[in-house]
Structure formats: structure tokens, C-alpha cells
Amino acid sequence: MNVLVIGASRGIGLEFVRQFLVEGAQVRATARDEAGLERLREIGATALTLDVTDAASAAGLAAQITGAKFDVAIVNAGAGGPRSGGLDAPPEADFDQVMHTNVLGPMRVIPQIAAALAPGGTIAVLSSMMGSIGSRTGAGMSLYRASKAALNSVLKDASLVLGDKAVCVALHPGWVRTDMGGSGADIDVATSVAGMKKVLAGLRAKDSGSFVNYDGSAIPW
């Protein structure tokens, strides 16, 4: 299996790399800085430099993956932003960071990934149940919620444009004990990633354009 993980220097992205490598996959993975790149090299991945918030860096991804024929590509790079919500407008700098990372970044790299997929390959974006409008009952972290709802829209568009050339899915990793999720979250990183990998392995063409929890259950848009 040939795998690409975008945003893999730590947390969920790094665990995806670890678990795929254990299974014998060939893994290319990205990080923004040398420390992250070195962590990837140490565990056996091919490390690629990429900052999805930088236009020039993002545009250079294609040259690093041309002809790769990925079976699975995961867009994991993300930012949490401020915890305020409701009707409070976020500071402009926070808005730019979160939206550039969670929305513009995937919009920049997904077309390049699509060109490097194996026939019928899978593109997954790491979304969040917090981006669901249909199941929403709270308004905390409204900037993060808005960014993930927008990311879901980007994923849905990709599924429609790519048609039967790829399976496109948005994944909710669960509430995970990471730097972003905090120490009081429900599950550890290994459990989350193992669940999402099981979901990815079971996807079929009819599942393209769906929003799925790490346990395989469907999430309302």
C-alpha cells in the first residue's frame, strides 16, 4: 500500500504514519519544520517539507508526489484556534490562521493529491463532529466549528468533481487525547487512528462524499 499523510509531525498524523508503517505500507508524510521531519524519518517514513498555510510551499507539493499512485491520502493538518464562541467575533489573526490551515490548505493540496492517486484511491480529510450543522447543540469554539463545516464542503465538492476516480470522505477522529483535545478526552490516539483505518479499509465507491465517525457510524452534515 502507498500512503500519503499531510500534517504528520505529531498527534493523529504521526500515529497514522506509525500504524501504516507497521502494516508494511510505503508512507510519505509532511511536516513544516526540521524537528517534525526528523521524527518522521526516525520511524521510517519518507519525509516531505510542507506548510499548507504558505502558498509557495503548498504549490510545491506536486513536484514531491508526481507519479506516486497513492492508495490512501489523508489531509490531517489543522489548527484549533480560540475557545470563545457564540456571537463573539474572533480576532483577525486567529481567523486567518484557522481558516488558512483548515480550509485554504486542503483546497490547495487536494487537487495535487488527486493527480497523484492510484485509480480508485481514497482521499480523507480530518474533520470534526464540531463541524456538523445537523447534529449541533452548542456554540463553543465557533471559529473551529465554522472551519470544519467549510472543510466538509470542500470534501463534498471534491467527491462530486472526482466522481468514480476517487473515494472522498470526511472523518471525525473522536475526542482524542492530543495537544488539541486535552488530557480529559475520551480516547487515546492509537484507538482513534485504528478506528479510522478500519473505516478507510471498508470504504466503497458508494461511500464517497460521506462524513464518518472513527467507529464507522455516519455523522449528519
Image (cartoon, rainbow, N blue to C red):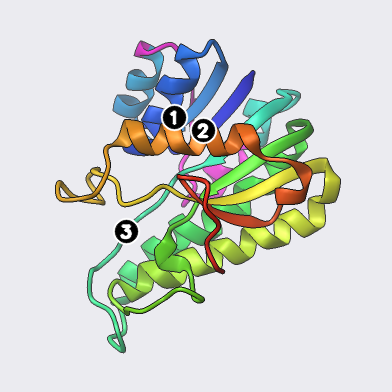
Residue 105 in sight: yes
Alpha carbon separation for disc pair 1 and 3 = 19 Å
The kind of residue tagged 2 is Lys
138 up-or-down from 208: above or below:
below
Label 1 Cα crowd, 10 Å radius (few <14 / some 14-19 / many 20+)? many
Residue 16: mark in rendering: 1
**Which region of the structure is painted magenta?**
42-61
Residue at the image point whose x is 84% and y is 45% from the top: 164
> How much space separates mark 1 and mark 2, taking CA atoms?
8 Å
Give the number of the disc on residue 80. 3
Q: Nearer the viewer, residue 26 or 189?
A: 189
Q: Amino acid at mark 3?
A: Gly
The image's mark for residue 99 is none
Query: Is residue 46 rendered magenta in the image?
Result: yes
Vertical placement of 187 versus 175: above or below?
above
In the image, farthest residue toward the left = 183
**Circle on res. 197:** 2
Q: Position of residue 208 (x, y in %)?
A: 71, 51
Q: Residue at x 72, y 44 (%)?
A: 167
Between residues 102 and 207, which one lies in front from this camera angle?
A: 207
Across and down, in percent, residue 174 comes to 37, 50
